[in-house]
Amino acid sequence: MLLDSIIMELGDFRRALRRRDQQVFDRIMDMAREHASASTVAAAVDPMDTIVLSILIEQQKQIDDLKEDSDAPSP
């Protein structure tokens, strides 16, 4: 719920973005949602910190997947 509240607070920022960037923003917020339950455990930490960490985790997983794909031998 806190994450959704923060996303709503960022609504004006999102609307000010170009359409393509709005779509990227939405995907990034989806990344944060992937770790929302872990964020509740760190209640004493600033919620934005856990949101950013969640996004970074998801982005790193994507980078790792891309690296694995590029390192795989071609058939």
Image (tube, grey):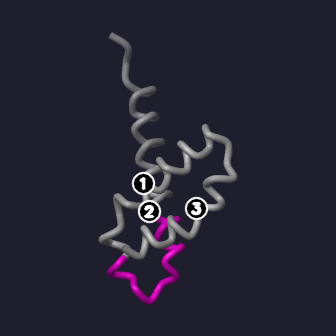
Quarter of the image with the C terminus is: top left
Residue for badge 1: 31
| Residue at x 45%, y 34% (from the top left corner) | 66
Above/below status of 52 relative to 28: below
Mark 3 secondary-structure assignment: helix
Q: Residues within 10 Å of mark 2 (few under 14, many from 20)?
A: many
Q: Which residues are magenta?
A: 40-54
Q: Are marks 2 and 1 in contact (CB under 8 Å)?
A: yes
Residue 11 numbered mark, or none: 3
Q: Measured from the top left, where is residue 24 in percent x and y?
A: 55, 44
Q: Extreme top residue here?
A: 75
Residue 10 found in image quarter: bottom right
- In this view, the residue in front, 12 or 38, is 12
Question: In the displayed structure, does residue 28 sit left or right of residue 14?
Answer: left
Kindly identify which residue carries mark 2: 54
Disc 1 secondary structure class: helix
Indicate whether 58 appears above or below 42: above
Q: Please identify, in this view, whether the residue under mark 2 or under mark 1 is nearer the observer.
A: 1
How many labels were placed on the picture? 3
The reply to whether the C-beta atoms of the residues labelled 3 and 1 are less than 8 Å apart is: no
The answer to which of marks 3 and 2 sits earlier in the sequence is 3
